[in-house]
Amino acid sequence: MYIDEPLKKYLDETASGSPTPGGGSVAALAGALGAALTGMVCNFTVGREKYKDVEGEVKQILSEAEELRSKLLDLMVADTQVYGQVSAAYGMPRGTEEEKKARSEAIRSALKEAMQVPFEVAVCCHKILKLNKPLVEKGNRNLISDVGVAVLLAESAMLSAVLNVEINLSYIKDEKFCQETREKLQPLVVESGELKSEICEKVKEAIGAVLI
Amino acid sequence: MYIDEPLKKYLDETASGSPTPGGGSVAALAGALGAALTGMVCNFTVGREKYKDVEGEVKQILSEAEELRSKLLDLMVADTQVYGQVSAAYGMPRGTEEEKKARSEAIRSALKEAMQVPFEVAVCCHKILKLNKPLVEKGNRNLISDVGVAVLLAESAMLSAVLNVEINLSYIKDEKFCQETREKLQPLVVESGELKSEICEKVKEAIGAVLI
């Protein structure tokens, strides 16, 4: 679904008045685009005489970037599927007290499961940022602006995913669960912001950029 | 090209060792994703009784967001095409002084034309951010995290496009042209950053987000 369909169709369905794909799915796709650019920089480095000293390391980065790209595309689809489960739980009967209780339980459980998708997207985007730290130094210099774009997109995809985690948490009335989730994500959010700034600074210096 | 092909193919070709699509094209696609989410929020607002007071304004935002999405998809493709012209200019003969001069002229001219694509992407992304300023107040509250994602992606797409303008400027040895280009873009970069912060702050407050 989506992956093998025309690119324009995904965008049309996003813009439409149907609930999926929405921001969570789009965040995963933006992360996958960051992973793809990371892979591109590696593919222009591996096999070049000039970069043979870093070939082993860059091959490893390429392999991890490709794995993250594939995982993020799966999450892009998964995000549209878990939404259906949340919807179904909200649609459960609530005539009797017992039904109300069962419905509440089902909603909470579906929301917790739905939240795992943007949570995983955030974890993957953080990994993409980490891969680009050595790559900005060792990758093919002609593609340094692509490192910059990879990093800008991965960080905004990470924050977008975190927004989707937060919107789910706002519906889950389970303080302990919310706190534990935030404690897991917080260091990744902070480190991602630092990595973005650090790597972008290097890109900016390398190309003599004035505007950003 | 690309638009009617499977989404996965665009990502595969980006990650591959072929020069296009690269960061410039991906920046345009990220902007188009931001425009699509902007449109989605509008489509969940227009036609609802609760939002009938803002219907006219939101319809106008929808129409502009859809135009920007279409333009950004065109730019996504255009970016891969202008690259070919730059490549062709670099491939021109440089045996005689006359050939060298003609080649330099052709390269400069192709680079200036190529730069127009990310320049336009930046202008479009700035417009998406402007559309979301009223939308964060007036759009369907259930989709406020989608406004956040639209804004995060549009701003990173804008900065990505600006990086691509800068990399082109770094090859164009024409100080006056570079300065004029930067003077046109600078206010858009500054305003985009401000709009992003302002709108994200409102999203954050609305959903009680802690992490971002």
Image: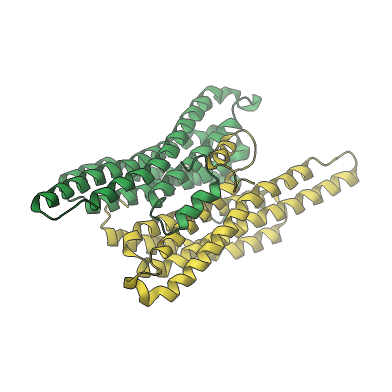
Chain colours: A yellow, B green
Q: Position of residue B56 (x, y in %)?
A: 53, 22
Q: Is residue A118 left or right of residue B113?
A: right
| Residue A141 can be seen in this image | yes
Q: Nearer the viewer, residue B155 or B170?
A: B170
Q: Nearer the viewer, residue A205 or B72?
A: B72
State whether residue B191 appears in this view.
Answer: no
* Image location (x, y in percent) of residue A116: 66, 57
Q: Is residue B73 left or right of residue A163?
A: left
Vertical placement of residue A133 versus A27, above or below: below
Percent position (x, y) of residue A137? 35, 69
Q: Position of residue A117 (x, y in %)?
A: 64, 55
Q: In the visual, does A86 lie left or right of B170?
A: right
Residue in front for this viewpoint, B169 or B187:
B169
* Residue for point 32% across, 52% down: A212
Q: Which residue is found at the position 66% from the left and 63% from the top?
A: A180
Residue at the (85%, 40%) spot, across then down:
A94
Left or right, B185 with reference to A68: left
What residue do we see at 47% from left, 40% from top? B32
Total number of numbered discs in the rendering: 0
Observer-nearest of B100 and B133: B100
